Image: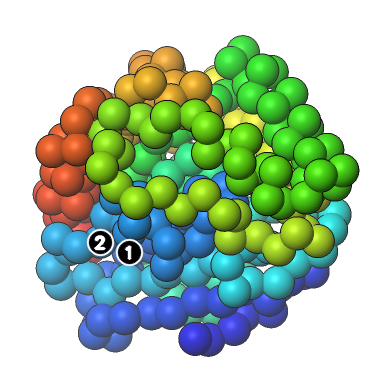
Amino acid sequence: MARFQTAGAQLSFEVVGKETDPLFVQLHGLTSSAWREHHAGLDVTGELSGFRVLRYDSRGHGSSTGRPVPDDYLWPQLAEDLLHLLEAVAPGETVHAGGPSMGAATQLCAALEEPHRFASLSLLVPPTVWSTRTEQTDQYLRSAEVVEQHGVETFVRLTGSAPPPPAQAGRTRQLRPAVSPELLPAVLRGASMTDLPAPEDLARLQVPVQILAWTHDAAHPVSSAETLHRLLPGSEFSIAETPHDLATWPSRVASFVGQYRR
């Protein structure tokens, strides 16, 4: 596993594939890691052909380090981390990216900052945004307090009581956060403080976008995906309601990305 130093963190990453092939970046969601997403059906690289793949853990997650500073975990900061990592791993290259939730938000923030960097974006289960984010913000703050006052085991027990989305039925759930107890409250508070840029800014984004949503998940509502689909010109959109639907995502991503291979 390689390491990349960025401001306040060392990012753990790996690149697999031929150096001459275009790059696809697999991102992950909040409290997860790049190497855990395949358990959730959210590593969508399995059907890619002729691409090399960059997987990395966001700051404070997985094998990456971080600081107990909530501002470090705002989506624009995570986007800066991604852009700095790309400059080290794939200098000057135009890349493809895909990933869920926090990873989807990171993609959008990075693409707004440097749109020439991205050939396509695959946004999986976009998180709550704008008007729907207030309730989720409160949940993150309560969760941070639970971790501080009662420990990670209580946090895991409480979060594990909610049923998974139907698309994940039958999968082994990874409930323990891939974030250390020392960093978890700051990571959650950072999530409570962040949001996407203004809708009118996103509407100007010209990068090809694919949006894949699932149902019955308050933290990743279909309404977020629908809102982004309306805002982003020419975006593709589909919803998974069953495990079979979810299993099609790698092939959907491969087909979409293949259209914009450079």
Q: Tally the marks.
A: 2
Up-down relation of residue 61 to residue 138 (above or below): below
Element under disc 2: loop
Q: Is residue 260 visible?
A: no
Up-down relation of residue 242 to residue 152 (above or below): above
Say left or right for 124 vs 80.
Answer: left
> Percent position (x, y) of residue 150?
81, 44
Element under disc 1: strand
The alpha-carbon separation of the residues under discs 1 and 2 comes to 8 Å
Residue identified by numbered label 2: 45
Say left or right for 252 vs 114.
Answer: left
Examine the image and state in which quarter residue 74 appears: top right
Up-down relation of residue 90 to residue 253 (above or below): below
Examine the image and state in which quarter residue 124 appears: top left
Say left or right for 203 vs 245.
Answer: right
Q: Are marks 1 and 2 in contact (CB under 8 Å)?
A: yes
Indicate the amino acid at tag 1: Phe
Quarter of the C terminus within the rendering:
bottom left
Up-down relation of residue 216 to residue 254 (above or below): above
The residue located at (59%, 83%) in the rendering is 3
Residue 150 - label: none
Residue identified by numbered label 1: 24
Say left or right for 8 vs 31.
Answer: right
